[in-house]
Amino acid sequence: MKESILDVLLYLFEHYFTEDADLVRDRDSLQSGLLQAGFSPAETSKAFDWLDALADQRPAVSEVRANGPTRVYSAPELDRLDVECRGFLLFLEQHGVLDADQRELVLDRVMALDQDELDLDDLKWVVLMVLFNQPGSEAAYAWMETQMFVDEPEPVH
């Protein structure tokens, strides 16, 4: 079975993170569960490294800054994120779902994935995982969670 880091992360997120906070703290149980689900030890290890890097970059609670600077993407970022993905990130930032620091964290985590390209659904999952890990982002997380199965984002109020 050829799986990616994102596949492992999505499995973790859907089956463990949103259901049992105590189980999340027990890495051995999580690893055992992933191996039983058919994921390779190498991809499992990479997924935990990805999550560790996300946790290490958790900023202090900050206020959302609207109308920040425009993000200029590097060539590798342009290769990985199509226009639709970049537009979605801009939409999230303009509507206060992500601040500039969170956007950068999303981009960092996207670039850390072992994939050449991401589609919009993959990006939404990365955004959701980043917001889940951010203190003070509960409202943004809840809004983003409602957007996971909608083709066009609903307005933010």
Image (cartoon, grey):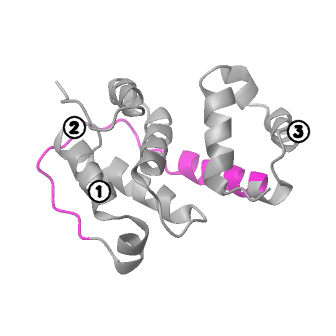
In the rendered structure, which disc, 3 or 1, sits on the residue that comes first in sequence?
3
Query: Dot 1, how many residues are within 10 Å of its Cα: few (below 14), some (14-19), or many (20+)?
Result: few
Q: Is residue 31 above or below residue 87?
A: above
> Residue visible at 75% across and 59% down?
2
Identify residue for label 3. 36
Give the label on residue 10, or none: none
Comparing 149 with 136, the one in front is 149
Secondary structure at badge 3 equals helix
Say which amino acid is labelled 2: Gly
Q: CA distance from mark 2 to mark 1?
A: 18 Å
Identified at 84% across, 54% down, the residue is 41
Give, as a single range, the part of the protein colored magenta.
44-72
Crowding near the residue tagged with mark 2, few <14, some 14–19, many ≥20 C-alpha atoms within 10 Å: some
| C-alpha separation, residue under disc 3 versus residue under disc 1 | 36 Å
Q: Is residue 15 magenta?
A: no
- Vertical placement of 113 versus 23: above or below? below
At which x and y percent is residue 139?
A: 33, 24
Under mark 3, the amino acid is: Gln
Mark 2 or 1: the one toward you:
1
Q: Is residue 58 left or right of residue 98?
A: right
> Which residue is label 2 attached to?
96
Q: Considering the image in quadrants, where does the C terminus appear?
A: top left
Q: Which mark is residue 84?
A: 1
Q: Position of residue 148 (x, y in %)?
A: 42, 34
The mark that comes first in sequence, 2 or 1, is 1
SS state under label 1: helix
Image quarter of the N terminus: bottom right
Q: Quadrant of residue 76?
A: bottom left
Q: How far from the left and from the top, in percent, is residue 85?
A: 33, 56
